Image (tube, helix red, strand yellow):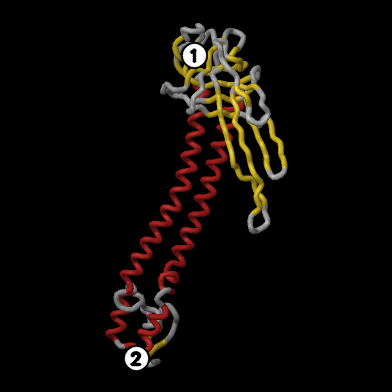
C-alpha cells in the first residue's frame, strides 16, 4: 500500500486508513489540495468558511477605503477654500462691487446704533466672543483632563473700516470665526477661557457684498447668500488664512497616505492568516469527527 502525505501538516497515512473515497472528497472540498482528514474541514464547512472570508474581506476593504477617503476629502476641502480666497483679490471698501468680497480692516462698533457685547468672564466690551468653562477631572488611571461644562458664543453686527470707507458686517451662524485665545484664568479645578474680537482690532472678512444699507448708506457684507466662497471672519491676515489651509491640506494628505499604507499591510496580513482564523473555531469538532476515521477514538 502506498502512503499519502498531507500538503498541510506533512503527516503520512496509509491509503487503507484514509480511503480513496474520503481522499477524493477531501481533495474536492479543499480546492484540489491533498490533505489528511485532520486538516480538511468536514462536509458542509467549506460554504460557511467562504462566507466568513468574504465578510472579512468586505470589512477590511471598507476599513481600508473610508478613512483614506475621509482624509482626502478634508484635504480637498481645504484646497478648495484656499483657491476661493486666492480667486477673489483683496479690495478696498470704496472699490468693492456686489458679489464675493475680500476685505481687511479695523472692526468698529456699528455707526447705525450698534451695541457691544460683554464677555462672560472678563466683562470686556467686544464685538464677538466665545467662552468656555472647564473642570479638571481625574480618571481611574490617575490621569487628569479638562472637561467643558459650559460654553457660550455670541456676535453682533459691526463696521469694517479700511481707510477708504466703511462696510457693515452682519455675521450669522454660517461664519467660521478664527480668533486666537484672548484670556484664560484658572480657579481651583476650574478653567475659564475667552476668544474675543474687540473694537479696533484688525480682521479679515470673506463674504458676500449685498446692496447698500438704506439706513446708514453703507455697503453690507452678509454670509447668507450662496456663492463660491467660505464665510470667514478672522483675526488672522489673508496670507495666514491661505497658508493655514495649504499646510493643513498637505498634512491631511500625508496622514491619508500613511494610513492607507498601514491599512494595506494590515489587510494582507489578515488575508494571510484568514485560513487559520476561520479554521480555529471548528478545529475541535473536526478532530472529534475524524478521530473515528483514523481509529483513534
Q: Position of residue 16 (x, y in %)?
A: 32, 92
Question: Would residue 135 be seen by someone viewing this image from the given angle?
Answer: yes
Residue 275 vs 132, above or below: the answer is below
Q: Which residue is mark 1?
A: 220
Q: In the image, 97: left or right of 160?
A: left
**Secondary structure under the numbered disc 1 in the rendered image:** strand
Tell me the tag on residue 17.
Answer: 2
Picture mark count: 2
Q: Looking at the rendering, which quadrant does residue 241 occupy?
A: top right
Q: CA distance from mark 2 to mark 1?
A: 93 Å
Tell me the tag on residue 118.
Answer: none
Q: Position of residue 121 (x, y in %)?
A: 66, 31
Q: Foreground: 104 or 273? A: 104
Residue at the left extreme?
21
- Residue at 40 percent across and 59 percent down: it is 57
- Residue at 36 percent across and 61 percent down: it is 54
Residue 115 vs 25, above or below: the answer is above
Amino acid at each position: 500500500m502506498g502512503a499519502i502525505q498531507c500538503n498541510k501538516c506533512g503527516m503520512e497515512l496509509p491509503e487503507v486508513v484514509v480511503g480513496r473515497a474520503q481522499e477524493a472528497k477531501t481533495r474536492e472540498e479543499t480546492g484540489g489540495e491533498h490533505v489528511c482528514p485532520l486538516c480538511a474541514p468536514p462536509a458542509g464547512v467549506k460554504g460557511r468558511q467562504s462566507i466568513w472570508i468574504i465578510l472579512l474581506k468586505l470589512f477590511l476593504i471598507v476599513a481600508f477605503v473610508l478613512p483614506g477617503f475621509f482624509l482626502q476629502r478634508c484635504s480637498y476641502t481645504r484646497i478648495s477654500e484656499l483657491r476661493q480666497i486666492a480667486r477673489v483679490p483683496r479690495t478696498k471698501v470704496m472699490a468693492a462691487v456686489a458679489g464675493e468680497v475680500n476685505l481687511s480692516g479695523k472692526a468698529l462698533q456699528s455707526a447705525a446704533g450698534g451695541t457691544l457685547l460683554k464677555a462672560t468672564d472678563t466683562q470686556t466690551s467686544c464685538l464677538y466672543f466665545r467662552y468656555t468653562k472647564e473642570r479638571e477631572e481625574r480618571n481611574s488611571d490617575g490621569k487628569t483632563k479638562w472637561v467643558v461644562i459650559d460654553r457660550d458664543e455670541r456676535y453682533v453686527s459691526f463696521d469694517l473700516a479700511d481707510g477708504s470707507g466703511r462696510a457693515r458686517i452682519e455675521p450669522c451662524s454660517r461664519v467660521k470665526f478664527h480668533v486666537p485665545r484672548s484670556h484664560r484664568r484658572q480657579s481651583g479645578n476650574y478653567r475659564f477661557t475667552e476668544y474675543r474680537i474687540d473694537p479696533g482690532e484688525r480682521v479679515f472678512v470673506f463674504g458676500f457684498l449685498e446692496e447698500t444699507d438704506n439706513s446708514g448708506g453703507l455697503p453690507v457684507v452678509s454670509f447668507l447668500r450662496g456663492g463660491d466662497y467660505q464665510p470667514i471672519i478672522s483675526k488672522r491676515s489673508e496670507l495666514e488664512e491661505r497658508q493655514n489651509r495649504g499646510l493643513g491640506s498637505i498634512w491631511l494628505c500625508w496622514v491619508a497616505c500613511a494610513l492607507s499604507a498601514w491599512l494595506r499591510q494590515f489587510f494582507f496580513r489578515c488575508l494571510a492568516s484568514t485560513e487559520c482564523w476561520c479554521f480555529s473555531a471548528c478545529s475541535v469538532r473536526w478532530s472529534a469527527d475524524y478521530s473515528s476515521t483514523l481509529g483513534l477514538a
